[in-house]
Amino acid sequence: MTPRLASPIRALARTSMLLLLVVMVAAGCSRNTKDDENEGVPVAELYQKGHDSMRKGNWSNGATSFRRLVAQYPYGPYTEQALVETAYANYKMGNNEEAISGIDRFIRTYPTHRNIPYMYYLRGLVNSNRDTVFLQRVWSLDSSRRDLASPNQAYADFNTVTDRYPNSRYAADARDRMATLRNTFARHEIETGLYYLRREAYVAAAQRATYLLETYPQSEYQNDAVALLAASYANLGNDTLAADARRVLEQNEPDHPSLTGNWPNEPWKIRRLNPFATERTAIDNDRD
């Protein structure tokens, strides 16, 4: 019996599968070559390679070199510094979860390391920017009106630096960043209080103002809190407390707009419909 020849379609399918297999093997070899290019490189040379990449702003290549260093040389001063550099590279690339994970692992593994103050400081930087998205940067959205869980954790991280390591090189900047975060938290309280004032929830508005003054003294918004107290007490019919609040405000900020009756100055409602407008509130209008 004469054997049946394979159909042209079946032959073409086999050829295509063979070509696909060749391409996959070639790609795999190329990838393995790239992954293994650092294999066997001396630790000092591997560290320098990663360091040079970091200096050029090539965070991805730097992190790759440092990860390879840690895998090949799991112990020693180069390894410890490579872990620090990897965490920083992840921070610069916006890989916040990876950065936090690496920082926490380093702190647990080397609790007495000389770089521990820096790692707490770096964790504060990561948490400060953790919820900062592209739209917030482009349109200047108000961070005080977002979830404050990460900024609160950042504040705790910076506080650790200033409290445990007050003489470290990072303490001064950590204090400045804590002051900025306190203003963010205070703004959150005053914005909430103004919301209650608009809703005619005057007791809640007064409570928010009191909380701000007690929790964030000397903040940028302390005089606004006093003005909020005055407005809330006036609407509640407590003229004595309202007059006391106005008297304090006159002493601390005699030109505050609430003393002339033009407060709070809410943004034009139609402006809120413009998706390209920067986010503004009564607090912003009062400062223009």
Image (spheres, grey):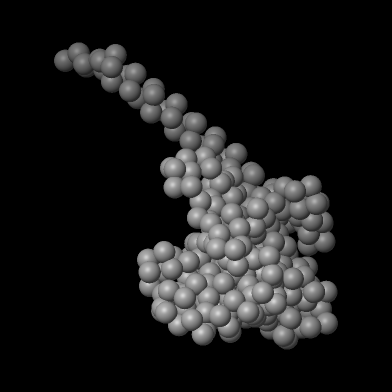
Residue 180 shown left or right of residue 138 in the figure = right
Residue 72 seen in the figure: no
210 horizontally vs 257: left or right: left
Q: Residue at x 35, y 25 (%)?
A: 14
Residue 177 figure quarter: bottom right
Q: Is residue 37 above or below residue 258?
A: above
Name which residue lies at 38% across and 69% down: 200
Vertical position of residue 70 compared to residue 37: above or below: below
Q: Is residue 70 above or below residue 215?
A: above
Q: Say which quarter of the image contains residue 163.
A: bottom right
Q: Quadrant of the N terminus?
A: top left
Q: Is residue 61 visible?
A: yes
- The percent position of residue 171, horizontal first and vertical second, equals 78, 76
Residue drawn at (78%, 59%), measured in percent from left and top?
47
Looking at the rendered structure, the number of numbered marks drawn on it comes to 0
Using the image as rendered, state which of residue 152 and residue 191 is in the foreground: 191
- At x 53%, y 75%, the residue is 230
Front residue of 154/62: it is 154
Which image quarter: residue 73? bottom right
Q: Is residue 250 left or right of residue 267?
A: right
Residue 100 picture location, percent across and down: 59, 68
Towards the viewer: 174 or 268: 268
User: From what the image shows, is residue 181 above or below residue 54?
Assistant: below
Q: Position of residue 160 (x, y in %)?
A: 68, 81
* Place of residue 161 in the rendered image (x, y in percent of width and height, measured from the top left): 72, 79
Q: Nearer the viewer, residue 178 or 262?
A: 262
Drawn side of residue 157 relative to residue 85, left or right: left
